[in-house]
Amino acid sequence: MKFADFISSGAIQPQLASADKESVIRELVQSLVTSGQIAEENTDGIIKAIVKREELGSTGIGRGIAVPHTKHPSVDKLIGTVGVSVEGVDFNSLDGDKVNLFFLLISPPDRPGDHLRALENISRQLRDDMFCKFLKQSKTVEDINQLLEEADNNQFVS
């Protein structure tokens, strides 16, 4: 699975304004609403589902990275977006560090394989320090889209 299969380029947020965990989740979900990927009336339910998932254990996996995600019946295909926080956000990460890179995923409950493949792709790409460094330095949607495309073309991970 590639980023192009599930990341909505119209929802990418290269300069997140939010300063706390729930606000980041809300900002990223709202970007998916604005880009037409999810319906406005499903916003609160999706946010609640992601926050509930976070209560089970933080998706802040360390090294400045978080992958908040949930399954929700309002979506019929896997969708996601990327957000970058220059300042970093306290996300209760496993290593205690602030998070700069966010990959938010929402998938239909009946497609667990897609959900797992997307998480696997994200984690594989994010193991590459150069990819993470460039992503953290990205200032525009175009910069992020280009990096995701390069990652899809295996220009980072060997």
Image: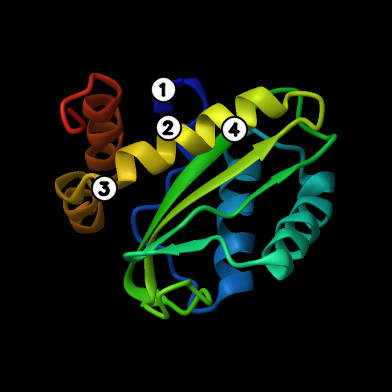
Tell me the residue at 82%/46% (across/down): 42
In front: label 1 or label 2: 2
Label 3 belongs to which residue? 140
Q: Residues within 10 Å of mark 1 (few under 14, many from 20)?
A: some
Quadrant (top left, top right, bottom left, bottom right) of the C terminus: top left
Q: Amino acid at mark 3?
A: Thr
- Lateral position of residue 70 relative to residue 100, left or right: right
Name the kind of residue labelled 1 in the image: Lys
How many marks can you see? Answer: 4
Q: Earlier in the sequence, mark 3 or mark 4?
A: 4
Q: CA distance from mark 2 to mark 3?
A: 22 Å
Earlier sequence position, callout 3 versus callout 1: 1
Of badges 3 and 4, the one in the foreground is 4
Q: CA distance from mark 4 to mark 2?
A: 9 Å
Badge 3 marks a residue whose secondary structure is loop
Mark 4 Cα within 10 Å, few/some/many (few <14, many 20+)? few
- Kindly report the distance in space between the C-alpha atoms of the residues bearing marks 3 and 1: 20 Å
Q: Earlier in the sequence, mark 4 or mark 2?
A: 4
